[in-house]
């Protein structure tokens, strides 16, 4: 076990590297040439433009004002400066509530740490169990629960503390849920008029031999919501078209590249080999080649576009239906339309940029089968992911490389290369897998059929958390692959499992302290440097950028990345709650992480990230649930640990804790979750009434006209697409269907 | 273990006793004097009246037509005769769907038994594992899986059979769910106009210092559902009043009794002692005494009634809100009204006779706390119910009785009495507990705050099933109290539990066969005799009945009793599915039970039971879920059994079965359950449109006026109550609130 000085050394190294990152960031960010890397959010908002060319040429790229280097940490107070309301305006509610997760960490752990250090640490310290045990131990262990002899009455302190921590955590969680729910409702209520307030997404429109999807939707809603239906927009299957547009964009990049090259060196036309990867084949003029290619693609695109608009088969069985009032939309989204609950499924439309278009047309049965497949696949991914990696690792050793590629023999026999391969290659397979894990999880979620980006990210985050819980948390404590754990747990009795894990928790404290410093301190500090976007921006800037618009596109502001970021925070909640009673020395490290990360991400949200969508903090129930899970896990593990300490009389008192916690969760779920999934009628009616009073002659139809058009039609540079797709339904004056004789009344 | 001849003997005894019950029934039912006991349903429907007095006096009471005794089983074909549609008309959908549970049992088990006997029994029989094992065994065991040696390839048969049985069960379940859902929707659609179609129950109306509940409700719905709100009816807290009315009814019974006595013997006024239990105290004239008492109660009732109508505190924070259209009610019931999801809770109103009035005013927080308390209480009831019973048993032995009541010593020392106490008293404590169990569970459900009788019965049924599963099924297999099992399971590894249970399953087959015959054959046959109602009817008839109306009230038709009946059927599903692969000889016994019970209960439903409410088969999702649970349990236990048989290679194949079963359940839940909990907009609109075309000038308000009045106001014999309570809201022409300026428009 590590001693205090070991930890001190590790802390020093990590603090230093964090400082190095901050210093590098401080220097790089004030160089005008990096301005678009470190302040893209302001460019996107149009509040900042490229540095003007006044002054020397050099000062366009390098900051020569040396005074500004002295204040190299002044971004920190600046990041904290912007008030929350302004931040909501600036970056949206999602980002602000995301930051509140860090604040929540501080709110939970600062008082807990205070209590632990004033009460529990002295109780632990004033024992000498470890000194008599004959085991090697460090000063850190003297502060932990391990220092108390078995069967001691002092365990009552820990029991009382466990109760105190649980109540405090639940109290803070409840407060926070209440605040976030109120923020969300206030945000939704004070918002501008938005198309998704009036719009409902209808899926699984049943096929009809006599009517087109569009007619069918219109008739259905005119019949069943006669006073509220306004219009609808069918969904086109434009996946192929968006592929073509994507390709055209890529080719245009190459064209730009060669044109730039040609302009810089007009004496020589750039050449290109048409074969594989440009390595062989016939040489052609690159500019002409790509110009021709773009022309061909443009033709293909317009053919495809025509095909989509004219072919009824390219209309998917889904539609965005708009209503005259928010009330009508709220009613339609929350009710079941048809006696068959698998057709005419209605739900709130996500906001237009949040829609994941590819999944809109998946039928019901396919959805349930997909869910089963993904569940099974995820189970295997979590518990058996080591198997393919182990195979790759066994292949990536010296002998098998020698066999497969004998001509490499002289190289790999060099001692340095050999040790590199043996030391590095096996690890790299695992590392690559872990880098691709979020992508794999995202693909799973997409396959599962969610229809909005926010839902995709939320689901991926849940899976990522579970993976981390099994493979990082339990994996580090029990040290074995997930499958070995699973096997062990199956063969172990139910009350043995928390004992096994609980008993090994105190021993792993130093490992997790190091983990927190590397991942939580240095990792967060590295985040602010944005090394990858920095390099990519400069590469693009050099090769592709011709106009200001190109430079705009070369920026990569990125997003918070809820699907990876949130599970990462949750790991710290888990560690903090589990170790709060066992080894409280861990808490300050976690508090530093939460504080540092709060400042860094607040800075990033203000200056860098550009959210793709706004879900109005729809993720909070997930955040809440995971903290509750962490709390319950910590209680069960404490129970296991204490029962190995012969403090068994505490068991009945400890078992009530998870029961109360789960009950608390159910209470919160009923009390607050509806604010995140349903839309209250009263609110809708209030906004409708206000709006009617303020703007009696509002042209809502015009407002909603093109709101839910596939982005490929919007982003296309050919203007005629708008015309082709603008087949917005006319005001339906009379419905030619036998099903009803009701007429839609003008609003 | 029992041999075939033992089983044969038990079967003979049980078949004989079943026949005895049928014979007694056949004789009793054709006696005119019992007519109201065996055909109350027809009396209630007004299709049958007391036998006319023509012919001899004796024939009014005794059937002298001896030919009718010869056809003593002819009720059976008669019971099967009524077609299903007519039966729905006659007894309601609940009863018909309840009968379908028995049919479902036949549909599942007849083909399974056929397959098992043609394929599996020969495979089992043609082994001689048991002969070589040196164990005692019977012919029954030779037919079971025990006869196959460990590690044999023949276990593949059982594996394939497990798959076949699972697929068949799931297929039948899916078909049945589809049929029942269609029946429910058809029933709801073809129904007469009913108040609950237009009405929504609002609970947790927030308190308002300025407005009464009634005003508040009116304003809220006029603002938020301006085009649809029609009227509302507040709920009075009439629990005390109904207590008084109840008491008055009881006193009137006594008055009738003494009046009858006096009429039969006019020479002597009946006397009564006013002291404890009428055993001592002053003697008074009984008729005068009770007349005075009734008068006093009548006064109390009218005072209380006045208090309720005038005191705003007796108005509960709940109301029945009626809408102009079914569409409006469907919308309001399915949407969230207020941004705070714990107030203004709306849900479909149960039909008036289904309402459980006492629970209408429980606030939200209290509800969640009650749920926790009941969950904990039920846990202790299930696992620790043996403790108080053991205490009672230990008290109820000879020595402690001798100590407590020494004067009884001479009596209990008599050998016969002594053996009776020792042999019978301990058992009687358990028996009494089991008799009261459904009542205890019902009290729990009531405490939990459900607002309709049907929901109360459904929840009690779930709890009863769980109790049975733990204490009857697992308790018989593992033979130990539930708490001992729990203790054992906690200390056992997860994969050991199915092994322990699985391995002891084949040995318990004969026990369960006997259980089925006693409880399922003889028990069902006893049901038709209705011994308790028969005795009570004749007692009442003799002492109380004066008028035809009294005789009407003396009938006790009873109900199906979903809360006890359904869990009892489910136990047979569980036994059948668990033993289908293990000991198929059990299946014919179960099939006989299902067949017999179907006929008996069909007869009872046609002739006897009178359902208190109609929930339109809302219980079917529960029935489906429990069969799925039984299926999953059977698969897990088979897995445990086979793994002890060294047929371990089957485990991966067997583990996919529960995964698929649970997935199937989730599919069904999504596909069919909405039909049982939500009301499709389309249906509501269709009925509204039809109605508007048929009856354009319908006075809906008049129709709904007194629909949701507390039954105590309706049943009271004083007619003036109607007037006092008829404070139905006038058409609200103008709303005096600042919150909106909208006027309600006439429909």
Image (spheres, coloured by chain):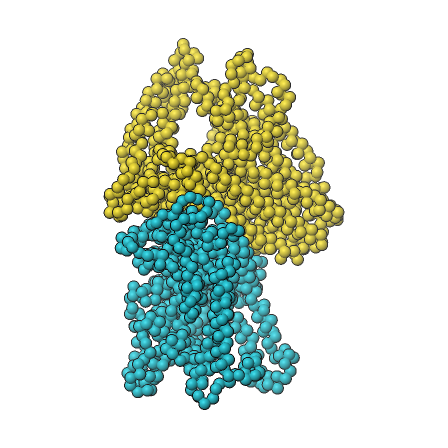
Chain colours: A yellow, B cyan
Q: Foreground residue, B702 or A58?
A: B702
Q: Foreground residue, B430 or B492?
A: B430
* Residue pictured at 30% horizontal, 70% vertical: B80
Percent position of residue A174, x then y: 57, 46
Q: What is the total number of numbered labels drawn onto the structure image?
A: 0
* Residue pictured at 54% horizontal, 34% vertical: A85
* Residue pictured at 47% horizontal, 39% vertical: A188
Q: Foreground residue, B742 or A180?
A: B742
Percent position of residue B33, x then y: 36, 81
* Residue pictured at 43% horizontal, 21% vertical: A549
Q: Is residue A593 left or right of residue A393?
A: right
Percent position of residue B682, x then y: 33, 50
Q: Foreground residue, B511 or B299?
A: B299
- The vertical placement of A101 against B17, above or below, is above
Residue sitting farthest toward the top? A267
Report which quarter residue A444 is drawn in: top left
Q: Is residue A380 visible?
A: no
- The vertical placement of B177 against A95, above or below, is below
Q: In this view, does B322 lie to the left or right of A30?
A: left
Q: Is residue B364 visible?
A: yes
- The vertical placement of B468 against A273, above or below, is below
Q: In this view, does A580 lie to the left or right of B441?
A: right
Percent position of residue B577, x then y: 41, 62
């Amino acid at each position: 076990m590590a001693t205090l000085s070991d930890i001190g050394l590790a802390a020093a190294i990590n603090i230093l590297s964090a400082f190095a990152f901050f210093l590098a960031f401080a220097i790089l960010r004030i160089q005008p040439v990096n301005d678009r890397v470190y302040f893209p959010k302001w460019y996107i908002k149009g509040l900042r433009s490229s540095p003007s060319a006044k002054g020397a040429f050099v000062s366009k790229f390098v900051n020569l004002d040396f005074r500004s280097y002295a204040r190299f940490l002044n971004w920190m107070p600046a990041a904290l400066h912007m008030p929350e309301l302004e931040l909501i305006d600036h970056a949206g509610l999602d980002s602000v509530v995301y930051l509140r997760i860090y604040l929540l960490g501080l709110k939970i752990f600062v008082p807990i740490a205070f209590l632990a250090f004033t009460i529990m640490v002295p109780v632990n310290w004033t024992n000498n169990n470890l000194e008599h045990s004959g085991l090697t131990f460090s000063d850190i262990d003297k502060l932990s629960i391990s220092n108390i002899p078995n069967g001691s009455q002092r365990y009552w302190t820990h029991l009382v503390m466990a109760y105190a921590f649980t109540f405090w955590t639940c109290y803070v969680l409840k407060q926070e849920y209440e605040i976030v729910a109120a923020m969300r409702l206030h945000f939704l209520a004070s918002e501008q008029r938005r198309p998704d307030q009036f719009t409902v997404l209808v899926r699984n429109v049943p096929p009809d031999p006599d009517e087109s999807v569009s007619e069918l939707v219109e008739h259905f809603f005119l019949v069943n919501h006669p006073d509220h239906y306004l219009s609808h927009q069918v969904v086109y299957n434009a996946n192929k078209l968006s592929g073509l547009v994507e390709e055209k964009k890529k080719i245009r990049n190459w064209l730009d590249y060669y044109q730039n090259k040609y302009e810089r060196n007009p004496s020589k036309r750039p050449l290109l080999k048409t074969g594989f990867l440009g390595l062989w084949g016939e040489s052609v003029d690159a500019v002409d080649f790509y110009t021709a290619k773009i022309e061909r693609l443009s033709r293909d695109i317009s053919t495809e576009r025509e095909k989509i608009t004219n072919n009824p088969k390219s209309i998917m069985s889904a539609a965005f239906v708009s209503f005259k009032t928010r009330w009508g939309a709220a009613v339609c989204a929350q009710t079941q339309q048809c006696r068959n609950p698998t057709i005419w499924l209605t739900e709130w439309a996500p906001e237009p940029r949040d829609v994941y278009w590819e999944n809109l047309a998946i039928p019901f049965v396919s959805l349930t089968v997909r869910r089963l497949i993904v569940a099974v696949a995820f189970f295997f991914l979590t518990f058996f992911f080591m198997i393919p990696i182990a195979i790759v690792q066994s292949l990536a050793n010296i002998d098998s490389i020698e066999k497969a590629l004998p001509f490499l023999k002289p190289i790999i026999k060099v001692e340095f290369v050999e040790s590199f391969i043996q030391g590095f290659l096996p690890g790299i397979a695992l590392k690559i897998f872990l880098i691709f894990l979020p992508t794999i999880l995202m693909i799973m979620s997409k396959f599962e059929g969610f229809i909005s980006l926010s839902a995709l990210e939320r689901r991926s985050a849940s899976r990522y958390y579970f993976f981390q819980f099994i493979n990082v948390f339990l994996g580090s404590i029990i040290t074995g692959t997930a499958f070995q754990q699973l096997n062990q747990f199956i063969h172990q009795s139910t009350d043995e499992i928390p004992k096994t894990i609980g008993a090994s928790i105190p021993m792993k404290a130093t490992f997790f302290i190091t983990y927190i410093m590397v991942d939580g301190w240095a990792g967060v500090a590295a985040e602010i440097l944005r090394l990858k976007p920095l390099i990519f921006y400069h590469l693009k800037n050099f090769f592709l950028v011709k106009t200001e618009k190109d430079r705009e596109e070369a920026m990569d502001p990125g997003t918070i990345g809820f699907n990876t970021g949130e599970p990462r925070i949750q790991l710290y909640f888990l560690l903090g709650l589990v170790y709060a009673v066992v080894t409280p020395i861990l808490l300050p490290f976690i508090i530093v992480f939460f504080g540092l990360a709060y400042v860094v991400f607040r800075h990033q949200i203000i200056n860098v990230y550009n959210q793709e969508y706004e879900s109005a903090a729809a993720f909070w129930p997930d955040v809440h649930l995971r903290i509750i899970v962490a709390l319950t896990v910590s209680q069960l593990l404490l129970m296991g640990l204490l029962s190995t300490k012969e403090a068994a009389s505490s068991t009945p008192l400890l078992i009530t804790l998870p029961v109360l916690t789960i009950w608390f969760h159910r209470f919160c779920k009923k009390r607050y979750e509806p604010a995140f999934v349903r839309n209250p009628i009263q609110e809708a009616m209030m906004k409708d009434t206000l709006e009617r009073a303020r703007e009696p002659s509002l042209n809502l139809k015009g407002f909603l006209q093109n709101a839910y058009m596939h982005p490929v039609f919007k982003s296309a540079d050919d203007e005629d697409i708008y015309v082709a797709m603008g087949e917005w339904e006319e005001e339906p004056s009379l419905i030619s269907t036998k099903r009803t004789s009701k007429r839609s009344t003008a609003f």
